[in-house]
Amino acid sequence: MWLFAIFAGIPLIEIALFILIGGAIGLWPTLGTVILTAAAGTWLVRAQGLAALQQLRDSLSEFRDPSEPLAHGAMVLVAGILLLTPGFFTDGIGFALLVPPVRAAVFRYLGQRIRAELHYRNTSSERHQRDPAADDVIDAEFTDLPPSDSKPNGPGQPVH
């Protein structure tokens, strides 16, 4: 039900804002403002997106949890979509998502509402104690040898 309210409510808010702002400043300034916010938003999204990508690279190279840079990158992407959508309400939300403290607050809020678990594979004998099905995994190293013209190795003969 709340999803329907969003999809029905946002266009109604946008129409009302277009009428109010267009009536106050006129048609051409209103259209110019919409185009200007889309252009400024595109530039800001590009800059913020590159910064979020660099933070993600840093967290991965330092073996830190990448969830926060990923979330910031996703919020910058949503901000870009909202800024490219014509309208004042969506522009306001989009510009708000480009402010790093706002993104941090949204991340904290979502972090309280969403629970994620990290699963990893142990490489010690603990794995066999906890998961008997892991016994069918063989960890080995091998070396490719060039094919030889000699006869196949029989029992007791060295492997070439």
Image: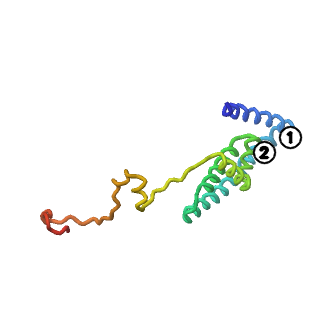
At a point 67% along the width and 57% down the height, the residue shown is: 47
Q: Residue 18 location, x and y as percent?
A: 79, 36
At a point 56% along the width and 65% down the height, the residue shown is: 62
Pointer 2 and pointer 1: residues touching (CB < 8 Å)? yes
Pointer 2 local density, CA inside 10 Å: few below 14, some 14–19, many at least 20: some
User: Does residue 69 lie above or below 18 as drawn?
Assistant: below
At a point 86% along the width and 40% down the height, the residue shown is: 25
Q: What is the secondary structure assignment of the residue under circle 2?
A: helix
The front one of 149 and 111 is 111
At a point 61% along the width and 61% down the height, the residue shown is: 54
Q: What is the secondary structure assignment of the residue under circle 1?
A: helix
Q: Quadrant of residue 61?
A: bottom right
Q: Residue furthest front?
A: 129
Pointer 1 local density, CA inside 10 Å: few below 14, some 14–19, many at least 20: few
Identity of the amino acid at label 2?
A: Thr
- Whether residue 25 sits left or right of residue 49 in the image: it is right
Q: Which residue is mark 1?
A: 25
Q: Residue 95 location, x and y as percent?
A: 74, 49
Q: Earlier in the sequence, mark 2 or mark 1?
A: 1
The front one of 127 and 51 is 127
Q: Which residue is mark 2?
A: 33
